[in-house]
Amino acid sequence: MSTIVVGVDHSAGAREALRFALEEAKLRQAKLRAVHAWHFRYEGWTGMEAGLRPIVGDELHELRDAATAALDSTLQEAISDTGGVEVERRVVEGAPAAVLVEESRDADLLVVGSRGLGGFAQLLLGSVSQQVRPPRRVPRGDRPAEIRQGVAMDVRLKRAYEPSAASDGYRVLIDRIWPRGVSRQQAQLGEWARELAPSGELRRWFDHDPARFAEFRRRYSDELAGQSDKLRELRRRARAGTLTLVYGARDTEHNDAVVLAEILRRGRRSR
């Protein structure tokens, strides 16, 4: 089973990163490893002559316990339902960037927030997105690790026949054909992006056959390569608020919206 690693502290950015990582784990059927790195240091320390002393014994245990509690609290706040994803908790002492790189050596994806908090909170995780760089190789598959900042894109999927809701945010119909029996008032669309629909030839070949979905994903990704401007526009909308891709297919797991959502979330072609 593949693994996705996410760096977690108690900031809003970390909670967004955690939600993003969980969605990626669902898509990839991967395990999620939540890592809380804590590293005590004295800001502005110039030497023992300043009267400062190292942290040892019970105080060190208290910091460790606080780090564990912070991780548990953030997990509870950010993801009440894991959706069947296995979640591994890791609390590690060390410089956050180094810890996250080490913890992600066997991972497919490392997700970090866009920034941490200042002050004492940075002693527990801090802002690491500018420090972390992918390991040169990851052992499994000998592939470069991916690193993604997880202030994430909120991309959701919904059938055109389900009632629209305010929580859908900006709704985009991505089918080439308007859903039968649905009025424009019921659809409540922000736009109809027909140009993102699979070609007629590909749609007829796929014919909603789950056995052909892997090849459909590959071919449809190739077709979307020519829609880079539109994809960038949708990513901007998804970063600014919720983006809901509206589709008509009965099969909610094997359709063009699933593939398009993967591409938008990953920022690259889906394979």
Image (tube, rainbow, N blue to C red):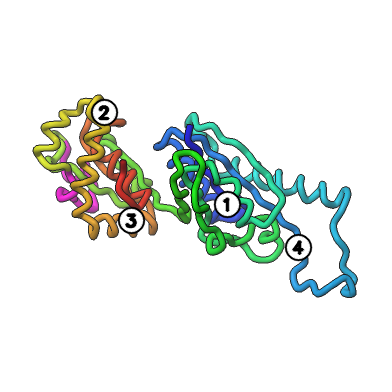
**Rendered image quadrant of residue 116:** bottom right
Q: Which residue is mark 1?
A: 101
Give the CA distance from mark 4 to mark 3: 38 Å
Give the CA distance from mark 3 to mark 1: 27 Å
What amino acid type is highlighted by mark number 4? Arg
The answer to whether the residues at label 1 and label 4 have Cβ atoms under 8 Å apart is no
Dot 4 falls on a residue whose secondary structure is: loop
Q: Residue at x 77, y 66 (%)?
A: 42
The magenta segment is 182-197
Q: Which residue is mark 3?
A: 235
Residue 184 magenta: yes
Give the CA distance from mark 1 to mark 2: 38 Å
Relative vertical location of residue 232 with respect to residue 207 in this rendering, above or below: below
What amino acid type is highlighted by mark number 3? Arg
Dot 1 falls on a residue whose secondary structure is: helix
Q: Which residue is mark 4?
A: 41
> Seen in the image, is 172 located left or right of residue 132?
left
Residue 84 magenta: no
